[in-house]
Image (cartoon, grey):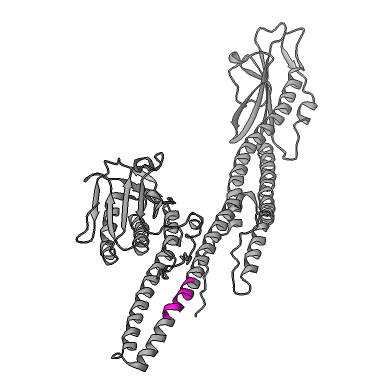
Amino acid sequence: MAAIRVGRPERVPSLRRRLLTRLLVPLGALAVGLGVGGSALIHGFVQSTHDRLLAGSTLAIAERLAVGDDDGEVTVDLPAVAFGMLESQARDNIYYNVAHEGGVITGYLDLPLPDIAAMPANVTVFRDASYHGHPVRVAAQVRRLYGVPQPVLVQVAETTAGRRALEVDLLLWLTLLEVALVGGSGMLVWGAVGRGLAPLKRLRRVIDARSARGGMALVPLPLAVVPAEVLPLVVAINGLLARLDQSIGTMRRFTADASHQLRTPLAVLRTHLALLRRYGTDSAEGRAALDDVEGAVKRLERLLVQLLALARADEDPPAVPAAPEVTDLIQVAMEVAAEQVPAALAQDVEVRFEGPEDGTALRVAGNGVLVGELLGNLLDNAIRYNRPGGTVTVRVGAGAGSLGAGPAAGPVMEVEDDGPGIPEAERGRVFERFYRLDRPGEPPRTGSGLGLAIVRALADRLGASVRLDAGQDGKGLKVTVTLRAASGEAGILPEISLSPPGRGSG
Protein backbone atom coordinates (compact mmCIF):
# COMPACT_ATOMS: atom_id res chain seq x y z
CA MET A 1 0.00 0.00 0.00
CA ALA A 2 1.50 3.31 -1.04
CA ALA A 3 2.24 5.82 1.67
CA ILE A 4 0.14 8.95 1.74
CA ARG A 5 2.12 12.15 1.86
CA VAL A 6 0.57 15.39 2.93
CA GLY A 7 2.40 18.14 1.05
CA ARG A 8 2.89 21.63 2.37
CA PRO A 9 1.40 24.56 0.45
CA GLU A 10 3.77 26.67 -1.61
CA ARG A 11 3.34 29.64 0.71
CA VAL A 12 2.94 28.58 4.33
CA PRO A 13 1.23 31.25 6.46
CA SER A 14 3.30 32.09 9.53
CA LEU A 15 1.45 32.88 12.73
CA ARG A 16 4.53 34.62 14.12
CA ARG A 17 4.89 36.78 10.99
CA ARG A 18 1.19 37.59 11.03
CA LEU A 19 1.28 38.61 14.69
CA LEU A 20 4.41 40.68 14.08
CA THR A 21 2.72 42.46 11.17
CA ARG A 22 -0.45 43.07 13.18
CA LEU A 23 1.61 44.62 15.98
CA LEU A 24 4.17 46.61 13.98
CA VAL A 25 1.75 48.21 11.52
CA PRO A 26 -0.22 49.99 14.28
CA LEU A 27 3.05 50.75 16.06
CA GLY A 28 4.45 52.30 12.87
CA ALA A 29 1.28 54.37 12.41
CA LEU A 30 1.61 55.53 16.02
CA ALA A 31 5.26 56.45 15.38
CA VAL A 32 4.23 58.52 12.34
CA GLY A 33 1.60 60.29 14.41
CA LEU A 34 4.12 60.96 17.16
CA GLY A 35 6.54 62.26 14.52
CA VAL A 36 3.98 64.74 13.18
CA GLY A 37 3.09 65.87 16.67
CA GLY A 38 6.75 65.96 17.68
CA SER A 39 7.67 68.14 14.69
CA ALA A 40 4.97 70.63 15.66
CA LEU A 41 6.19 70.56 19.26
CA ILE A 42 9.81 71.06 18.19
CA HIS A 43 8.85 73.97 15.93
CA GLY A 44 6.95 75.64 18.74
CA PHE A 45 9.74 75.01 21.26
CA VAL A 46 12.49 76.41 19.00
CA GLN A 47 10.34 79.39 18.03
CA SER A 48 9.48 80.30 21.61
CA THR A 49 13.10 79.90 22.78
CA HIS A 50 14.50 82.21 20.11
CA ASP A 51 11.60 84.63 20.48
CA ARG A 52 12.40 85.04 24.18
CA LEU A 53 15.98 86.01 23.31
CA LEU A 54 14.74 88.36 20.60
CA ALA A 55 12.28 89.93 23.03
CA GLY A 56 15.05 90.36 25.61
CA SER A 57 17.22 92.19 23.10
CA THR A 58 14.33 94.48 22.11
CA LEU A 59 13.53 95.23 25.76
CA ALA A 60 17.22 96.00 26.51
CA ILE A 61 17.21 98.66 23.74
CA ALA A 62 13.83 100.05 24.76
CA GLU A 63 15.02 100.51 28.33
CA ARG A 64 17.83 102.82 27.09
CA LEU A 65 15.50 105.27 25.37
CA ALA A 66 15.71 108.84 26.74
CA VAL A 67 14.48 112.38 26.01
CA GLY A 68 16.90 115.33 25.87
CA ASP A 69 16.36 118.09 28.46
CA ASP A 70 17.09 120.94 26.10
CA ASP A 71 15.57 120.02 22.77
CA GLY A 72 13.17 117.18 23.72
CA GLU A 73 14.71 114.83 21.16
CA VAL A 74 14.64 111.05 21.65
CA THR A 75 18.04 109.46 22.19
CA VAL A 76 19.17 105.86 22.74
CA ASP A 77 22.33 104.40 24.21
CA LEU A 78 22.68 100.95 22.61
CA PRO A 79 23.92 98.42 25.18
CA ALA A 80 26.35 95.69 24.01
CA VAL A 81 24.36 93.04 25.79
CA ALA A 82 21.36 93.75 23.57
CA PHE A 83 23.01 92.02 20.62
CA GLY A 84 25.37 89.72 22.50
CA MET A 85 22.50 87.59 23.74
CA LEU A 86 21.53 86.86 20.11
CA GLU A 87 24.88 85.43 19.10
CA SER A 88 24.79 81.70 18.22
CA GLN A 89 26.76 79.04 16.33
CA ALA A 90 24.53 79.60 13.30
CA ARG A 91 25.86 83.19 12.99
CA ASP A 92 22.45 84.64 12.15
CA ASN A 93 22.38 88.26 10.91
CA ILE A 94 20.81 90.80 13.28
CA TYR A 95 19.10 94.01 12.19
CA TYR A 96 17.55 96.77 14.31
CA ASN A 97 16.20 100.31 14.20
CA VAL A 98 14.59 102.89 16.47
CA ALA A 99 11.91 105.01 14.75
CA HIS A 100 10.03 108.12 15.89
CA GLU A 101 7.52 110.22 14.00
CA GLY A 102 8.07 108.28 10.74
CA GLY A 103 11.86 108.66 10.79
CA VAL A 104 14.63 106.33 11.91
CA ILE A 105 16.65 107.57 14.87
CA THR A 106 19.25 104.82 14.62
CA GLY A 107 19.70 101.45 12.91
CA TYR A 108 18.83 100.14 9.48
CA LEU A 109 16.82 102.66 7.54
CA ASP A 110 15.15 100.13 5.16
CA LEU A 111 13.98 97.70 7.83
CA PRO A 112 10.19 97.46 7.24
CA LEU A 113 8.08 99.38 9.76
CA PRO A 114 4.78 98.02 11.10
CA ASP A 115 1.59 99.97 11.74
CA ILE A 116 2.54 101.72 14.97
CA ALA A 117 -0.97 102.97 15.65
CA ALA A 118 -2.32 99.38 15.81
CA MET A 119 0.31 98.20 18.29
CA PRO A 120 -0.23 98.20 22.09
CA ALA A 121 2.30 100.07 24.19
CA ASN A 122 5.02 98.27 26.18
CA VAL A 123 4.11 94.89 24.63
CA THR A 124 6.55 92.97 22.42
CA VAL A 125 4.93 91.86 19.15
CA PHE A 126 6.46 89.27 16.82
CA ARG A 127 6.07 88.90 13.09
CA ASP A 128 7.69 87.12 10.16
CA ALA A 129 9.03 89.26 7.35
CA SER A 130 11.58 89.30 4.52
CA TYR A 131 14.65 91.55 4.46
CA HIS A 132 17.00 91.67 1.49
CA GLY A 133 15.52 88.39 0.23
CA HIS A 134 16.05 86.50 3.50
CA PRO A 135 13.34 85.44 5.92
CA VAL A 136 13.63 87.19 9.27
CA ARG A 137 11.85 87.09 12.58
CA VAL A 138 11.07 90.60 13.89
CA ALA A 139 10.34 91.65 17.49
CA ALA A 140 8.86 95.15 17.88
CA GLN A 141 7.81 97.20 20.92
CA VAL A 142 6.18 100.62 21.15
CA ARG A 143 7.24 102.88 24.03
CA ARG A 144 5.63 106.13 25.15
CA LEU A 145 8.12 108.52 26.74
CA TYR A 146 7.35 111.39 29.06
CA GLY A 147 7.37 114.72 27.24
CA VAL A 148 7.13 113.14 23.78
CA PRO A 149 3.63 113.05 22.25
CA GLN A 150 4.36 110.40 19.59
CA PRO A 151 5.31 106.79 20.51
CA VAL A 152 8.77 105.41 19.81
CA LEU A 153 9.20 102.09 17.93
CA VAL A 154 12.04 99.66 18.72
CA GLN A 155 12.62 96.73 16.29
CA VAL A 156 15.13 93.90 16.33
CA ALA A 157 15.18 91.36 13.45
CA GLU A 158 17.06 88.07 13.17
CA THR A 159 17.50 85.68 10.24
CA THR A 160 15.98 82.21 10.79
CA ALA A 161 18.81 79.94 9.61
CA GLY A 162 19.75 79.01 13.18
CA ARG A 163 16.18 78.18 14.04
CA ARG A 164 15.77 75.93 10.99
CA ALA A 165 19.09 74.13 11.69
CA LEU A 166 18.08 73.44 15.29
CA GLU A 167 14.68 72.12 14.21
CA VAL A 168 16.30 69.80 11.64
CA ASP A 169 18.71 68.41 14.24
CA LEU A 170 15.92 67.75 16.74
CA LEU A 171 13.70 66.15 14.05
CA LEU A 172 16.58 63.93 12.98
CA TRP A 173 17.11 62.73 16.54
CA LEU A 174 13.37 62.17 16.95
CA THR A 175 13.29 60.11 13.74
CA LEU A 176 16.25 58.01 14.84
CA LEU A 177 14.61 57.36 18.21
CA GLU A 178 11.33 56.30 16.57
CA VAL A 179 13.15 53.98 14.13
CA ALA A 180 15.04 52.45 17.04
CA LEU A 181 11.79 52.10 18.98
CA VAL A 182 9.97 50.35 16.12
CA GLY A 183 12.94 48.14 15.25
CA GLY A 184 13.59 47.21 18.87
CA SER A 185 9.90 46.52 19.39
CA GLY A 186 9.90 44.25 16.34
CA MET A 187 12.83 42.26 17.71
CA LEU A 188 11.26 42.01 21.16
CA VAL A 189 7.88 41.05 19.70
CA TRP A 190 9.49 38.42 17.44
CA GLY A 191 11.14 36.78 20.43
CA ALA A 192 8.08 37.18 22.67
CA VAL A 193 5.79 35.63 20.08
CA GLY A 194 8.24 32.75 19.70
CA ARG A 195 8.17 32.16 23.44
CA GLY A 196 4.40 32.53 23.47
CA LEU A 197 4.05 29.89 20.76
CA ALA A 198 6.27 27.43 22.62
CA PRO A 199 3.22 25.53 24.02
CA LEU A 200 2.09 24.88 20.45
CA LYS A 201 5.50 23.43 19.62
CA ARG A 202 5.28 21.17 22.67
CA LEU A 203 1.80 20.12 21.56
CA ARG A 204 3.16 19.33 18.10
CA ARG A 205 5.89 17.18 19.65
CA VAL A 206 3.25 15.33 21.65
CA ILE A 207 1.29 14.62 18.46
CA ASP A 208 4.45 13.63 16.55
CA ALA A 209 5.46 11.28 19.35
CA ARG A 210 2.14 9.47 19.07
CA SER A 211 2.68 8.66 15.40
CA ALA A 212 6.42 8.01 15.64
CA ARG A 213 5.96 4.25 15.38
CA GLY A 214 3.58 4.31 12.45
CA GLY A 215 0.41 4.25 14.55
CA MET A 216 -1.71 7.02 15.97
CA ALA A 217 -3.02 7.15 19.53
CA LEU A 218 -6.47 8.70 19.46
CA VAL A 219 -6.64 9.58 23.14
CA PRO A 220 -7.47 13.26 23.84
CA LEU A 221 -4.64 15.76 23.83
CA PRO A 222 -3.64 17.12 27.27
CA LEU A 223 -5.27 20.47 28.07
CA ALA A 224 -3.21 21.41 31.13
CA VAL A 225 -0.46 23.21 29.17
CA VAL A 226 -2.63 24.57 26.36
CA PRO A 227 -2.94 28.39 26.26
CA ALA A 228 -6.44 29.80 26.64
CA GLU A 229 -6.32 31.31 23.12
CA VAL A 230 -5.96 27.91 21.42
CA LEU A 231 -7.97 25.91 23.96
CA PRO A 232 -11.14 25.89 21.76
CA LEU A 233 -9.05 24.58 18.84
CA VAL A 234 -7.55 21.75 20.93
CA VAL A 235 -10.98 20.91 22.37
CA ALA A 236 -12.31 20.67 18.80
CA ILE A 237 -9.37 18.43 17.86
CA ASN A 238 -10.12 16.23 20.86
CA GLY A 239 -13.72 15.99 19.74
CA LEU A 240 -12.56 15.03 16.26
CA LEU A 241 -10.22 12.40 17.73
CA ALA A 242 -13.08 11.01 19.82
CA ARG A 243 -15.35 10.76 16.76
CA LEU A 244 -12.53 9.20 14.74
CA ASP A 245 -11.86 6.70 17.51
CA GLN A 246 -15.57 5.90 17.64
CA SER A 247 -15.69 5.41 13.87
CA ILE A 248 -12.62 3.17 13.92
CA GLY A 249 -14.08 1.24 16.84
CA THR A 250 -17.34 0.81 14.93
CA MET A 251 -15.44 -0.48 11.91
CA ARG A 252 -13.46 -2.88 14.09
CA ARG A 253 -16.61 -4.15 15.80
CA PHE A 254 -18.27 -4.58 12.43
CA THR A 255 -15.27 -6.52 11.13
CA ALA A 256 -15.15 -8.68 14.26
CA ASP A 257 -18.91 -9.28 14.22
CA ALA A 258 -18.92 -10.12 10.53
CA SER A 259 -15.95 -12.50 10.77
CA HIS A 260 -17.49 -14.24 13.80
CA GLN A 261 -21.00 -14.59 12.43
CA LEU A 262 -20.02 -15.57 8.90
CA ARG A 263 -18.08 -18.62 10.06
CA THR A 264 -21.20 -20.68 10.86
CA PRO A 265 -23.08 -20.35 7.53
CA LEU A 266 -19.84 -20.69 5.59
CA ALA A 267 -19.00 -23.86 7.52
CA VAL A 268 -22.48 -25.20 6.72
CA LEU A 269 -21.95 -24.41 3.04
CA ARG A 270 -18.56 -26.16 2.97
CA THR A 271 -19.94 -29.23 4.76
CA HIS A 272 -22.95 -29.69 2.53
CA LEU A 273 -21.01 -28.97 -0.64
CA ALA A 274 -18.71 -31.81 0.41
CA LEU A 275 -21.80 -34.00 0.88
CA LEU A 276 -23.02 -33.05 -2.58
CA ARG A 277 -19.72 -34.08 -4.09
CA ARG A 278 -19.91 -37.42 -2.30
CA TYR A 279 -23.56 -38.39 -2.86
CA GLY A 280 -24.61 -36.24 -5.85
CA THR A 281 -27.91 -34.43 -6.25
CA ASP A 282 -30.03 -37.52 -7.07
CA SER A 283 -29.78 -39.13 -3.65
CA ALA A 284 -31.83 -38.20 -0.60
CA GLU A 285 -28.67 -37.06 1.15
CA GLY A 286 -27.81 -34.77 -1.78
CA ARG A 287 -31.27 -33.24 -1.89
CA ALA A 288 -31.17 -32.66 1.87
CA ALA A 289 -27.75 -31.07 1.48
CA LEU A 290 -29.15 -28.77 -1.23
CA ASP A 291 -31.97 -27.72 1.09
CA ASP A 292 -29.45 -27.01 3.84
CA VAL A 293 -27.27 -25.04 1.41
CA GLU A 294 -30.27 -22.95 0.37
CA GLY A 295 -31.14 -22.27 4.02
CA ALA A 296 -27.55 -21.37 4.82
CA VAL A 297 -27.42 -18.97 1.85
CA LYS A 298 -30.63 -17.29 3.04
CA ARG A 299 -29.29 -16.97 6.57
CA LEU A 300 -26.03 -15.61 5.20
CA GLU A 301 -27.89 -13.07 3.03
CA ARG A 302 -29.99 -11.90 5.98
CA LEU A 303 -26.91 -11.70 8.19
CA LEU A 304 -25.07 -9.53 5.65
CA VAL A 305 -28.09 -7.24 5.30
CA GLN A 306 -28.33 -6.84 9.07
CA LEU A 307 -24.60 -6.28 9.48
CA LEU A 308 -24.67 -3.55 6.84
CA ALA A 309 -27.74 -1.97 8.47
CA LEU A 310 -25.95 -2.04 11.83
CA ALA A 311 -22.85 -0.45 10.31
CA ARG A 312 -24.95 2.35 8.82
CA ALA A 313 -26.73 2.90 12.13
CA ASP A 314 -23.41 3.08 13.99
CA GLU A 315 -22.07 5.84 11.76
CA ASP A 316 -21.65 9.26 13.28
CA PRO A 317 -24.75 11.37 12.64
CA PRO A 318 -24.27 13.97 9.92
CA ALA A 319 -24.01 17.65 10.69
CA VAL A 320 -27.32 19.25 11.59
CA PRO A 321 -28.72 20.77 8.38
CA ALA A 322 -30.09 24.28 8.24
CA ALA A 323 -33.59 22.83 7.71
CA PRO A 324 -34.10 19.54 9.69
CA GLU A 325 -35.53 16.61 7.73
CA VAL A 326 -39.24 16.02 8.24
CA THR A 327 -40.86 12.61 7.60
CA ASP A 328 -44.51 11.63 7.35
CA LEU A 329 -44.69 8.78 9.87
CA ILE A 330 -48.07 7.54 8.56
CA GLN A 331 -46.82 7.09 5.00
CA VAL A 332 -43.56 5.42 6.05
CA ALA A 333 -45.33 3.04 8.45
CA MET A 334 -47.91 2.00 5.85
CA GLU A 335 -45.24 1.42 3.19
CA VAL A 336 -43.07 -0.68 5.52
CA ALA A 337 -46.05 -2.68 6.78
CA ALA A 338 -47.09 -3.41 3.17
CA GLU A 339 -43.55 -4.55 2.32
CA GLN A 340 -43.63 -7.06 5.18
CA VAL A 341 -46.92 -8.67 4.08
CA PRO A 342 -45.25 -11.35 1.85
CA ALA A 343 -43.03 -12.45 4.73
CA ALA A 344 -46.07 -12.51 7.05
CA LEU A 345 -48.04 -14.62 4.55
CA ALA A 346 -45.18 -17.09 4.41
CA GLN A 347 -45.21 -17.35 8.23
CA ASP A 348 -49.04 -17.49 8.40
CA VAL A 349 -49.07 -14.24 10.41
CA GLU A 350 -51.62 -11.43 10.09
CA VAL A 351 -50.36 -7.81 9.94
CA ARG A 352 -52.67 -5.03 11.13
CA PHE A 353 -52.16 -1.28 10.87
CA GLU A 354 -53.79 1.29 13.15
CA GLY A 355 -53.24 4.95 12.38
CA PRO A 356 -54.91 8.30 11.71
CA GLU A 357 -57.59 8.68 9.05
CA ASP A 358 -56.71 8.90 5.38
CA GLY A 359 -55.15 12.23 4.38
CA THR A 360 -53.86 13.01 7.86
CA ALA A 361 -50.11 13.59 8.09
CA LEU A 362 -48.09 12.88 11.21
CA ARG A 363 -44.75 14.60 10.76
CA VAL A 364 -41.67 13.66 12.76
CA ALA A 365 -38.15 15.05 12.80
CA GLY A 366 -35.81 12.51 11.24
CA ASN A 367 -34.67 10.80 8.07
CA GLY A 368 -37.40 8.71 6.48
CA VAL A 369 -35.02 5.91 5.46
CA LEU A 370 -33.82 5.48 9.04
CA VAL A 371 -37.39 5.51 10.37
CA GLY A 372 -38.34 2.88 7.79
CA GLU A 373 -35.37 0.66 8.67
CA LEU A 374 -36.20 0.90 12.37
CA LEU A 375 -39.83 -0.13 11.83
CA GLY A 376 -38.82 -2.79 9.30
CA ASN A 377 -36.55 -4.50 11.83
CA LEU A 378 -39.27 -4.42 14.49
CA LEU A 379 -41.79 -5.96 12.07
CA ASP A 380 -39.29 -8.57 10.88
CA ASN A 381 -38.63 -9.65 14.47
CA ALA A 382 -42.34 -9.70 15.34
CA ILE A 383 -43.18 -11.84 12.30
CA ARG A 384 -40.17 -14.15 12.56
CA TYR A 385 -40.66 -15.00 16.24
CA ASN A 386 -44.48 -15.12 16.21
CA ARG A 387 -46.53 -18.29 16.30
CA PRO A 388 -48.38 -19.62 13.23
CA GLY A 389 -51.76 -17.93 13.04
CA GLY A 390 -50.50 -15.04 15.17
CA THR A 391 -51.11 -11.32 14.72
CA VAL A 392 -48.75 -8.34 14.48
CA THR A 393 -50.22 -4.87 14.97
CA VAL A 394 -48.54 -1.63 13.91
CA ARG A 395 -49.87 1.53 15.57
CA VAL A 396 -48.90 5.15 15.02
CA GLY A 397 -50.20 8.18 16.89
CA ALA A 398 -49.46 11.77 17.80
CA GLY A 399 -48.33 10.91 21.35
CA ALA A 400 -48.09 8.16 23.90
CA GLY A 401 -51.41 9.34 25.36
CA SER A 402 -53.15 8.80 22.04
CA LEU A 403 -52.23 5.12 22.18
CA GLY A 404 -53.34 4.70 25.76
CA ALA A 405 -49.86 4.19 27.16
CA GLY A 406 -49.46 7.33 29.27
CA PRO A 407 -49.10 11.08 28.85
CA ALA A 408 -48.34 12.52 25.42
CA ALA A 409 -44.60 12.58 24.75
CA GLY A 410 -44.28 13.00 20.96
CA PRO A 411 -45.14 10.93 17.88
CA VAL A 412 -45.22 7.24 18.74
CA MET A 413 -45.22 4.00 16.79
CA GLU A 414 -45.88 0.62 18.35
CA VAL A 415 -45.33 -2.91 17.10
CA GLU A 416 -47.24 -5.51 19.11
CA ASP A 417 -47.39 -9.27 18.57
CA ASP A 418 -49.06 -12.15 20.37
CA GLY A 419 -46.08 -14.49 20.20
CA PRO A 420 -44.04 -15.90 23.09
CA GLY A 421 -42.77 -12.45 24.12
CA ILE A 422 -39.63 -11.66 26.09
CA PRO A 423 -39.34 -12.23 29.85
CA GLU A 424 -39.01 -8.99 31.81
CA ALA A 425 -35.63 -10.05 33.17
CA GLU A 426 -34.25 -10.43 29.63
CA ARG A 427 -35.57 -7.16 28.15
CA GLY A 428 -32.43 -5.22 28.99
CA ARG A 429 -30.10 -7.72 27.28
CA VAL A 430 -31.97 -8.26 24.01
CA PHE A 431 -30.49 -4.99 22.69
CA GLU A 432 -27.01 -6.51 22.88
CA ARG A 433 -25.51 -7.68 19.62
CA PHE A 434 -25.90 -11.38 18.81
CA TYR A 435 -27.80 -12.04 22.01
CA ARG A 436 -30.41 -14.80 21.58
CA LEU A 437 -33.01 -16.03 24.02
CA ASP A 438 -32.85 -19.67 25.04
CA ARG A 439 -36.39 -21.05 25.25
CA PRO A 440 -36.58 -24.59 26.68
CA GLY A 441 -38.73 -26.92 24.64
CA GLU A 442 -38.63 -24.72 21.52
CA PRO A 443 -36.63 -25.34 18.34
CA PRO A 444 -33.58 -23.11 17.85
CA ARG A 445 -34.26 -19.80 16.07
CA THR A 446 -32.58 -18.85 12.83
CA GLY A 447 -32.10 -15.20 13.72
CA SER A 448 -28.72 -13.58 14.16
CA GLY A 449 -29.49 -11.62 17.32
CA LEU A 450 -28.98 -8.26 15.58
CA GLY A 451 -32.56 -7.07 15.04
CA LEU A 452 -33.10 -5.19 18.31
CA ALA A 453 -29.47 -4.03 18.37
CA ILE A 454 -30.12 -2.36 15.02
CA VAL A 455 -33.34 -0.86 16.41
CA ARG A 456 -31.49 0.65 19.38
CA ALA A 457 -28.71 2.08 17.18
CA LEU A 458 -31.23 3.62 14.74
CA ALA A 459 -33.28 5.04 17.61
CA ASP A 460 -30.19 6.66 19.11
CA ARG A 461 -29.36 8.23 15.78
CA LEU A 462 -32.93 9.55 15.40
CA GLY A 463 -33.02 10.85 18.97
CA ALA A 464 -35.88 8.43 19.77
CA SER A 465 -36.55 6.18 22.77
CA VAL A 466 -37.46 2.47 22.76
CA ARG A 467 -39.44 0.67 25.44
CA LEU A 468 -40.36 -3.04 25.71
CA ASP A 469 -43.56 -4.15 27.45
CA ALA A 470 -45.78 -7.19 27.51
CA GLY A 471 -48.65 -7.27 25.02
CA GLN A 472 -52.37 -7.28 25.81
CA ASP A 473 -53.39 -9.70 28.55
CA GLY A 474 -49.71 -10.19 29.31
CA LYS A 475 -49.07 -12.10 26.08
CA GLY A 476 -46.55 -11.36 23.38
CA LEU A 477 -44.37 -8.26 23.16
CA LYS A 478 -45.13 -4.60 22.57
CA VAL A 479 -42.30 -2.31 21.41
CA THR A 480 -42.97 1.43 21.77
CA VAL A 481 -40.79 3.93 19.90
CA THR A 482 -41.21 7.63 20.79
CA LEU A 483 -39.88 9.96 18.09
CA ARG A 484 -39.17 13.69 18.03
CA ALA A 485 -42.13 15.79 16.92
CA ALA A 486 -41.91 18.12 13.93
CA SER A 487 -45.51 19.33 13.34
CA GLY A 488 -48.95 17.94 12.51
CA GLU A 489 -51.87 16.51 14.38
CA ALA A 490 -53.09 12.95 14.66
CA GLY A 491 -56.59 11.93 13.72
CA ILE A 492 -58.79 9.03 14.79
CA LEU A 493 -57.25 5.57 14.86
CA PRO A 494 -59.06 3.39 12.32
CA GLU A 495 -57.92 -0.19 11.89
CA ILE A 496 -56.60 -1.56 8.61
CA SER A 497 -55.95 -5.29 8.30
CA LEU A 498 -53.27 -6.73 6.05
CA SER A 499 -54.00 -10.43 6.54
CA PRO A 500 -53.37 -13.69 4.71
CA PRO A 501 -56.17 -14.93 2.41
CA GLY A 502 -59.07 -16.52 4.19
CA ARG A 503 -58.44 -14.84 7.58
CA GLY A 504 -60.47 -12.12 9.16
CA SER A 505 -59.26 -8.76 10.22
CA GLY A 506 -60.36 -9.27 13.82
Kindly identify the residue that appears in the image at 42 percent across and 54 percent down: 459
**Drawn side of residue 300 relative to residue 500, left or right:** right
Q: Main secondary structure of the magenta part?
A: helix
| Residue closer to the observer: 452 or 214 | 452
In the rendering, at what x and y percent does residue 416 appear? Answer: 36, 53
Residue 434, percent from left and from top: 47, 67
What residue is shown at x 34% (from left), y 93% (from top)? 279
- Say if the magenta span includes residue 175: no
The vertical placement of 57 against 89, above or below, is above
Which residues are drawn in magenta? 257-266
Residue 43 in the image, given as x and y percentages of width and height:
65, 35
Q: Is residue 339 visible?
A: yes
For the image shown, how many numbered marks are present on the structure?
A: 0
Judge by depth and name the residue closer to the eye, 300 or 228: 300
Identify whether 271 is placed above or below 12: below
Q: From this viewpoint, is residue 80 visible?
A: no
* Image quadrant in which you'd find residue 44: top right
Is 424 positioned to the left or the right of 173 in the image? left
In the picture as drawn, the residue positioned furthest to the bottom comes out as 278
Q: Which residue is situated farthest in the left direction here?
A: 502
In the displayed structure, 377 sits above or below 2; it is above
Q: Is residue 141 left or right of residue 240?
A: right
- Say which of 384 and 395 sits in front: 384
Kindly give the residue lying farthest to the front in the view shown: 441
| Depth check, front residue: 404 or 194 | 404
Residue 20 percent coordinates (x, y) = 61, 53
Query: In which quarter of the view is residue 291 placed?
Result: bottom left
